[in-house]
Image (cartoon, helix red, strand yellow):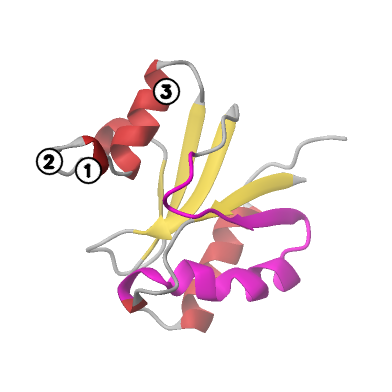
Amino acid sequence: MKKIYILGNPSFESDSLPVKLLPKLKSSLPNFQFIHLDPTENLPEEEHLILIDIILGIKEVKVLTDIDKIESSPNVSMHDFDLGFQLKLMKKLGKIDKVTIIGVPQNINESQVLEQIKQTLGKCPQKKK
């Protein structure tokens, strides 16, 4: 069963949509294992890491596979490392090989984004048992 990690903070409305979708994703896509990942935790080390997260400035679900295209925030201290920086560092250290980020718009209808995610994940090949 392919693991899909859900990022987002339920305490912040602007970053909560992926977490709100978690129960619906689990029930409508039982062939995937959806796991909410706290943003303060370390990302799992997997050959192919699949994440669902908010991406600012998009209007529909987008798939990002080139982490070098992720713009990092300015790093002033060790507390400023964002997802892009963490993914790039993990790849450089050989902790992950491939990353797929399913980007969710910030302001979109839940049922609309759920359908778009389902279509996107329907194109993901399943591991053979």
> Residue 91 has which mark?
3
Residue 107 visible in the current orientation: no
> Residue 74 has which mark?
2
Look at mark 1 in the image and give the residue it sits on: 80
> The residue under label 3 is which amino acid type?
Lys
Q: Nearer the viewer, residue 43 or 97?
A: 43
Q: Residue at x 53, y 82 (%)?
A: 111
Are circles 2 and 1 on residues that touch, CB within 8 Å?
Answer: yes
Q: Earlier in the sequence, mark 2 or mark 3?
A: 2
Disc 2 versus disc 3: distance between alpha carbons? 20 Å
In which quadrant will I find the C terminus?
A: top right
> The residue under label 2 is which amino acid type?
Pro
In the displayed structure, does residue 91 sit left or right of residue 3? left
In the displayed structure, does residue 72 sit left or right of residue 101? left
- SS of the residue at dot 1? helix
Residue 83 falls within the magenta-colored stretch: no
Disc 3 versus disc 1: distance between alpha carbons? 19 Å
- SS of the residue at dot 2? loop
> The residue under label 1 is which amino acid type?
Asp
Q: Residue at x 45, y 72 (%)?
A: 10
Q: Nearer the viewer, residue 56 or 9?
A: 9
Residue 25 falls within the magenta-colored stretch: yes
Region in magenta: 14-42
Which numbered mark, 2 or 3, is in the foreground of this view?
2
Which numbered mark, 2 or 1, is in the foreground of this view?
1
